[in-house]
């Protein structure tokens, strides 16, 4: 799931910035903006990139939570094995009495 979210956000980012690059290559007819079209296009591309960044961060959090759950499960198994090894059993209690 985390890898899928990261891939989707990466593809979206590539698409947004490719459209921005293609927009810069095409000639623009005279407009009322006075030549500020590339600046506005850049701001639009940055604004459209924000959801992709949020999606990538969410994918990172999902992956980190999965890793934390796996590590905690391993630690519980290790702790149970240590308790089985070090805690006295019923046979040990009879021998020491």
Image (cartoon, rainbow, N blue to C red):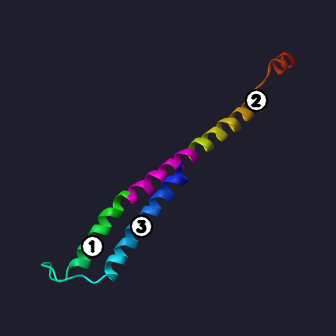
Residue 67 x/y as whole percent: 58, 47
Number of other residues with Cα within 10 Å of mark 1, as a class: few under 14, some 14 to 19, many 20 or more:
some
Residue assigned mark 3: 15
Dot 2: what SS?
Answer: helix
Q: Is residue 4 magenta?
A: no
- Which numbered circle lies on residue 41? 1
Q: Residue at x 63, y 38 (%)?
A: 73
| Residue 93 x %, y % | 81, 18
Disc 1 is placed on an element classified as helix
Using the image, determine if residue 25 lies above or below residue 58.
below
Please report the residue visible at 65 percent of the width from the left and 40 percent of the height from the top. 75
Q: Which residue is mark 2?
A: 84
Q: Is residue 55 magenta?
A: yes
**Up-down relation of residue 86 to residue 41 (above or below):** above
As drawn, the label of residue 59 is none
Residues packed near mark 2 inside 10 Å, few (<14), some (14 to 19) or many (20 plus): few
Lower position in the chain sequence, tag 2 or tag 3: 3
Span of residues in magenta: 52-67
Question: Where's residue 8, x and y in %?
Answer: 47, 57
Q: Residue furthest right?
A: 95
| Alpha carbons under labels 1 and 2: distance apart | 65 Å
Which residue is at the front of the view, 28 or 33?
28
- The residue located at (50%, 47%) in the rendering is 62
Looking at the image, is mark 1 or mark 2 earlier in the sequence?
A: 1
Q: Give the mark nearest the N terminus, 1 or 3.
A: 3
Badge 3 marks a residue whose secondary structure is helix
* Quarter residue 96 falls in: top right
Nearer-the-camera pick, 10 or 20:
20
């Amino acid at each position: 799931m985390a890898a899928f979210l990261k891939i989707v956000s990466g593809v979206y980012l590539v698409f947004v910035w490719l459209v921005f690059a293609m927009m810069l290559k095409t000639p623009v007819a005279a407009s009322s903006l006075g030549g500020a079209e590339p600046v506005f296009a850049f701001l639009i591309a940055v604004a459209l990139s924000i959801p992709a960044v949020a999606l990538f961060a969410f994918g990172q959090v999902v992956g980190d939570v999965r890793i934390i759950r796996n590590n905690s499960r391993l630690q519980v198994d290790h702790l149970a094995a240590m308790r089985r090894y070090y805690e006295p059993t019923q046979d040990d209690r009879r021998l020491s009495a």
